[in-house]
Image: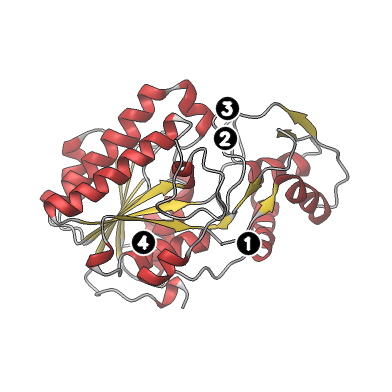
Amino acid sequence: MSYQDVIFEKDSVFLVGGGAGFIGSNICEALVNMGYTVRCLDNLSTGKFENIEHLTKCNNFTFIEGDIRDFDTCLEATKDVTYVLNQAAWGSVPRSIEMPLLYEEINIRGTLNMMEASRQNGVKKFVYASSSSVYGDSTVLPKKEGQEGKVISPYALTKKVDEEYGRLYKELYGLDTYALRYFNVFGRRQDPNGMYAAVIPKFIKQLLNDEVPTINGDGKQSRDFTYIDNVIEANLKACKAPSDAAGEAFNIGAGGREFLIDIYYNLCEALEKKVEPNFGPNRKGDVRDSNADISKAREAFGYNPEYDFKKGIELAIEWYKENL
């Protein structure tokens, strides 16, 4: 069952925190196209208005420019909302190492503001973005919930704290919360620009521009790259999850494992480029290997990713060719 087959009450209202970002805008678009009422809350610090501009012409979409660090903004945005899908956060492990205080403000206090506002306004389900970085220095593969190591970046710590708040809000206040641990999401609208850009869009843009990409480390790091439509599926299906699964964290990956150097050469082949990469130092705080055990999400709410890496990367390349 794909996400288009997930059915909600017709009068359901969705609030997407960080809805102008890469993941958030794709969720907004899916829900708007399915005919539901959607609110997008974003301060446009990392999200882009152009990601959701086409949706502003739709009667069932509302854009709220606001910051999750302001509790009154969160309280107003969550009024009469059925489901909150909170993607509002700052990503990037390296940037979190440079700016730990800002990450604490946005990723911890901001998420807590959204949870508390949702509690006060009687939101039915609170689904929010966590991260595979929570597994830290654990070398166990595949990654399985409950087998975490020590976190090795401020970003990872913020997500770990969010998950603890999610557990508490279920246990203390009865708010159904679901933490989705994303594994290296990629796809349409992911920003290829800037020093903190994700590796796949960055490589694609550089190769299309005949630039020489730099791989941090030896390229033998592995990742469970997860196409954006799988993440949309997880968010919508988590909204239908049973209450007894609330307060928990769930791996959201494709269940595969790709090596960075292999991906690089596959991109070269797909784009008909013959460019040898540069190799730079390893990045601080990066996890070496990543591969998700997705059985818990499958059992709890039927998560069954439709897109494997091969299918997803073909769609991503096609999108970037048309839009860069």
How far, Cα to Cα, is label 3 from label 2? 6 Å
224 left or right of 10 in image? right
Q: Where is residue 275 drawn, in percent x and y?
A: 86, 40
Tag 3 and tag 2, C-beta contact below 8 Å: yes
Q: 283 above or below 6?
A: above
Circle nearer the viewer, 4 or 2: 2
Circle nearer the viewer, 1 or 2: 2
Residue 165, by quadrant, is top left
Identify the residue position indicated by label 2 in the image.
286
How far, Cα to Cα, is label 4 from label 1? 28 Å
Identify the residue position indicated by label 1 in the image.
312
Which circle's residue, 4 or 2, is located before the other in the chain?
4
Q: Where is residue 37 drawn, in percent x and y?
A: 28, 63
Q: Where is residue 205 drawn, in percent x and y?
A: 70, 42
Residue at left offset 52%, top offset 42%: 138
Which circle's residue, 1 or 3, is located before the other in the chain?
3
Residue at left offset 31%, top offset 42%: 162
Tag 4 and tag 3, C-beta contact below 8 Å: no
137 left or right of 246 in image? right
Secondary structure type for disc 4: loop
Q: Looking at numbered disc 2 in the image, what kind of residue is underneath it? A: Asp
How far, Cα to Cα, is label 4 from label 2? 40 Å
Residue 57, by quadrant, is bottom left
Which circle's residue, 4 or 3, is located before the other in the chain?
4
